[in-house]
Image (cartoon, rainbow, N blue to C red):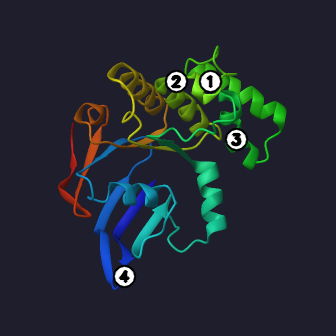
Amino acid sequence: MLQLKNVWKLYAMGEAAVKALRGLNVEIQRGEFIAIMGPSGSGKSTLMHLLGALDQPSEGSLRFEGEEISQWDEDRLASLRGQKIGFVFQSFQLVPALTAIENVELPMVFQRISRAKRRERAQTLLARVGLAERMHHKPAQLSGGEQQRVAIARALANDPEIILADEPTGNLDTESGEKILRLLNELNEEGKTIVLVTHNTEAASYASRIIKLKDGACVYPTALEV
């Protein structure tokens, strides 16, 4: 489904170049639950940005469903993100002025789905994550765990094939974090491909495979069974 082959990512820092990824080779199959781990500065976020079509490699091949996307323009990448990829972030990134249901509707607005259809789907998704009674609350009126469940519902709005979750339990207490991980696991069992960036070994235990990074490269063996 996703394949990086000999991928390098360099960032200019004055006259120097920082090598965030160094010849990385990663393949993620449809339906997998992958955890990406590594210390700060290991390249986890850079890898996530590439997998999510938020950035492009400096060198190497990046394929999505067999199609080379490393040279696509921003319009094509935006279309890919909108239709195929759902994002869940540590900081939730909900719009404060909007209610839960309005936040979930947002991705569907950009896909030009009718108001009636997006309202119906948003209601269904919020019920799916256990927030049917909280859909008209704004983020400030919700707990951290509830906000993250809204973010997951929003990530599912356009029925993406892959969910990218960047430290989704990092700002949550243990109980709320476990609920989020169980929800991601349920989505995986239903066929969604899940890629989880985490520092937490307990969170990584939900994955079927772990990719460990250090200094922008995979720590071999690249695939460690949990």
Q: Distance between the residues labelled 3 and 2?
A: 18 Å
Label 4 – label 2 distance at C-alpha: 42 Å
The amino acid marked with disc number 3 is: Leu
Q: Residue furthest left?
A: 220
Q: In the rendering, at what x and y percent does residue 37 appear?
A: 27, 47
Q: Mark 4 points at which residue?
A: 14
Could you say where residue 134 lies in the image, as x and y percent from the top left? 63, 18
Residue 18 sits in which quadrant? bottom left
Query: Based on the displayed image, in which of its 4 quarters is residue 14 positioned?
Result: bottom left
Q: Mark 1 points at which residue?
A: 126
Answer with the quarter of the image where residue 159 lies. top right
Q: What residue sits 71% from the left and 36% below the top?
A: 105
* Residue 123 position (above or below residue 109): above
Q: In the rendering, which numbered label is found on residue 106?
A: 3
Figure label count: 4
Write down the residue under mark 2.
146
Mark 4 neighbour class, 10 Å CA radius: few under 14, some 14 to 19, many 20 or more? few
The amino acid type, in three-letter code, at marker 1 is Leu
Q: Taking 40 as reference, is 9 left or right?
A: right
Q: Which of marks 3 and 4 is nearer the N terminus?
A: 4
Left or right: 151, with 132 as reference point: left
Residue type at the position of mark 4:
Gly
Residue drawn at x 35%, y 56% as measured from the top left: 27
Are discs 3 and 1 less than 8 Å apart at CB? no
Q: Give the vertical position of 1 relative to 13 (above or below).
A: above
Marks 4 & 2, CB-CB < 8 Å contact = no
Circles 1 and 4, Cβ within 8 Å, touching? The answer is: no
